[in-house]
Amino acid sequence: METNKLYVGNLSYSVNDEGLAELFNAIEGIKVTEARVITDRISGRSKGFGFVTLETSEMAEKAIEAMDGKEVNGRKIVVNIARPRPSRA
């Protein structure tokens, strides 16, 4: 299980990949390697959550402490370690 990949939930629908990366890069000592907002395949609209991959698991812990429950664009976001995607039968 990757401990440097974070789930970020309850995002405003206006947040895009770049905005998500900027949000976490603004934390001192954090380096984002990838940020992705999940979108609907048909409409292209954000589903309100995404994933951020950081360089180390220590950075991930620091990011969780700094961002979990923080208000962003009027919404309290949820940040935690991403769980592996369940396999489909």
Image (cartoon, helix red, strand yellow):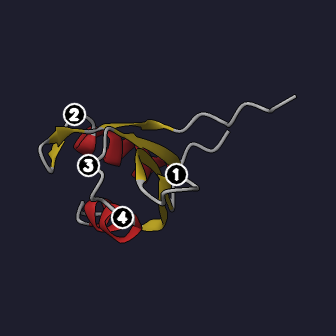
From the viewer's perspective, is residue 68 above or below residue 72? above
Q: Is residue 12 above or below residue 55?
A: above
What whole-number distance in Å separates the C-alpha atoms at marks 3 and 1? 14 Å
Mark identifier at residue 12: 3
Q: Nearer the viewer, mark 3 or mark 2?
A: 3
Disc 2 crowd, CA 10 A, few/some/many (<14, 14-19, 20+): some
Label 4 and label 1: CA atoms lie apart by 13 Å
Under mark 3, the amino acid is: Ser
Mark 1 closeness class: few <14, some 14–19, many ≥20 residues within 10 Å: few
Number of the front mark, 1 or 2: 1
Q: Tell me if residue 20 can be seen.
A: yes
| Residue 60 x, y percent position in the rendering | 43, 48
Mark 4–mark 3 Cα distance, whole angstroms, equals 9 Å
The residue singled out by tag 2 in the image is 69
| Amino acid at circle 4 | Asn
Q: Which residue is mark 4?
A: 16
* Residue depicted at x 24% and y 60%: 27
Q: Which quarter of the image is occupied by the N terminus?
A: top right
Mark 4 or mark 1: which is in front? 1
User: For the residue labelled by badge 3, is the local secondary structure a helix, a strand or a loop?
Assistant: loop
